[in-house]
Image (cartoon, helix red, strand yellow):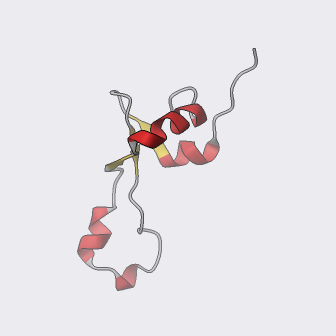
Amino acid sequence: MPKLKTNRAAKKRYRETASGKFKRTKSNRRHLLANKTSRQKKSGKVMNAYADKTCEAAIKKMLPYGN
């Protein structure tokens, strides 16, 4: 059986934790930052959000080897 391909977009967006959850970066941090408060800007700085449970099966398919 051939190797499965990793979805490159998903690899850049998600990281699997030791417990099997998927971490992601929060949105609204790319542009138009001058209009946002420092609190809004600070909230999405690091990978501090988790992917929704309903999406986990799809993410696992896109990342067959963990990543």
Name the side, left or right, on which 38 lies relative to 60: left
Q: Is 59 in front, or is 26?
A: 59
Q: In the image, residue 32 lies at what x, y percent?
A: 44, 80
Q: In the rendered view of the protein, which quadrant contains the N terminus?
A: top right
Name the side, left or right, on which 12 lies relative to 6: left
Question: Which residue sits at x=41%, y=69%?
Answer: 28
Q: Residue furthest left?
A: 39
Number of on-image labels? 0
Q: Residue furthest top?
A: 1
Q: Residue furthest right?
A: 2
Q: Is 46 in front, or is 54?
A: 54
Q: Is residue 18 above or below residue 11?
A: above
Dividing the picture into quarters, in which one does residue 6 lie?
top right
Q: In the image, residue 39 lies at what x, y percent?
A: 23, 72
Name the side, left or right, on which 17 lies relative to 12: left
Question: Which residue sits at x=58%, y=32%?
Answer: 61
Q: In the image, residue 44 lies at what x, y percent?
A: 33, 61
Question: Which residue sits at x=34%, y=54%?
Answer: 46
Q: In the image, residue 27 lies at what x, y percent?
A: 42, 63
Q: Residue furthest bottom?
A: 35
Question: Which residue sits at x=27%, y=66%?
Answer: 42
Dividing the picture into quarters, in which one does residue 51 lie?
top left
